[in-house]
Image (tube, helix red, strand yellow):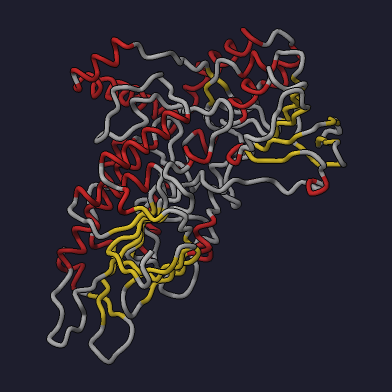
Amino acid sequence: MAEHEHVRVAVVGSGFGGLGAAVRLRREGVTDFVVLERAGSVGGTWRDNSYPGCACDVPSHLYSFSFAPNPDWPRTFSGQEHIRAYLEHVTDVFGLRPHLRLNSEVLRMTWDSETLRWDIETAGGRLSADFVVSATGPLSDPKIPDIPGLDSFPGKVFHSARWDHDYDLRGKRVAMVGTGASAIQIVPAIQPLARNVTLFQRTPPWVMPRMDRAISGAERLLHRQLPFTTQARRGLLWGIRELQVQAFTKHPGQLGAVEQLAKRNMARAIKDPALRAKLTPDYRIGCKRILLSSTYYPALAQPNVDVVASGLSRVEGSKLVAADGTEAQVDAIVFGTGFHVTDMPIADRVVGADGRTLAEAWKGGMEALRGASAAGFPNWMTVIGPNTGLGNSSMILMIESQLNYLADFVRQLDVLRVPPGPQGTGGGRVALDARPAAVRAWNHRVQERMKRTVWNTGGCTSWYLDANGRNSTIWPGTTTEFRRATQRVDLAEYEVLRPVSQGDSGAVADESAEAAV
């Protein structure tokens, strides 16, 4: 990275959100940007999560960019290696390699109110940017619970997102801690190899069959020859999920029928009534993420798998003790305990206009205008921000909506920018800062809608909720509604900042902005 490099836009992260932002910037004619990536390659969560059995639970043709359709997906639900290869392909096709700054983890970014720029310190050097797109994603930093005695465990310990491929699980006694989306893929993959698998289950998930199959050569040929068939397939997958949304957001009682299907799915594989009782949730389906697997229950029914219906409480040497007193001797511990979703570490590294970090600003809970802009952090937006998550569809749909918002944000800055003054003052610099009242109004509407949803009324504690019990993660509507809400930037929701005259310090707000809207 060049010393004192300055760019118009700095994108942080090279997963779907970061690469999508880069593509959209190029399509808008913006080429003065960099993509800052802490690792040595692109891919985000699909690079980091390489555990056995890792795959997507959203159909392949919906879990891809609309502007970069892939007619050659090998399966209806693609594996990690295929999704990562797709992201590498997008990077090449859209000419993003020259913009990448790999091994450049962001250590600090600070807003300079005098220059109206972000000063960014990375592991690869320093730079500044007029605008920052934070696309680190909510599933980027693993969370391992603070378990007493864990430091003294003599065996192997790792998180599902940091899988140790050099450690051979064959013949080992393995503890799987957690029963989320990763765990239900890992257990069936390692069960045939391990001597024994002990699953520590704090809360049982609802699991539906995963209707996965190979996509035939004829289908792929059809999609290559007639691209509209790929679009039609994507449209059908999207439409079905849009129709399902009301059951999650307005009428959770309708999900009872789905629970019966899930129970029948369990009963087909789990014949032992005691085990079935352990695995049956006591909350409404959909309150926690509905998981898809056709191999999870059959794996749990195998004689070398033990289900402990209690969370891991402490570690005593190689002995693990559950909260209910159950003990297990193990050689390795695999944590499938999720990520820092509502307390994203990147927030500690972003310093806004008033000197506070984003983490301090979000101490009472994450809030962002239209899931993108935080008050006090000018010319900064996040992709997959607060209340943009989904419980039943593809996050790529939400990402693309936020890219629409990004594109209009850049256009608005171009419109508002003025030529430099007679002595070169000003330099055409301008910034947009979300008004606190606009952020509060947006989040009030979101939280009011959230009250009726299954995520708030379903009777569970999920990673959707923050430390205050507030759902700051999920979008309580359809993807169509979110796309309408993010079509353009409403300048009335922002304060326009411009540099003051030469000799003064700081920036001034352009009070004419609202009148001009």
> Visible in this render: residue 443?
no
Q: Residue at x 63, y 20 (%)?
A: 188
Quadrant location of residue 99? bottom left
Q: Residue at x 66, y 23 (%)?
A: 190
> Looking at the image, is 495 positioned above or below residue 339?
below
Direction from residue 252 to residue 155 in the image, left or right: right
Direction from residue 462 to residue 202 in the image, left or right: right
Q: Residue at x 37, y 45 (%)?
A: 17
Direction from residue 215 to residue 318 in the image, left or right: right
> Looking at the image, is 299 positioned above or below residue 127?
above
Quadrant location of residue 218? top left
Q: Quadrant of the C terminus?
A: bottom left
x, y (%) of residue 239?
Answer: 30, 24
Query: How many marks on residues?
Result: 0
Q: Nearer the viewer, residue 409 or 82?
A: 82
Q: Quadrant of the N terminus?
A: bottom left
Q: Residue at x 59, y 45 (%)?
A: 142
Quadrant location of residue 183? top right
Q: Nearer the viewer, residue 112 or 288?
A: 112
> Visible in this render: residue 115?
yes
x, y (%) of residue 269?
Answer: 64, 9
x, y (%) of residue 476?
Answer: 41, 39
x, y (%) of residue 500?
Answer: 25, 84
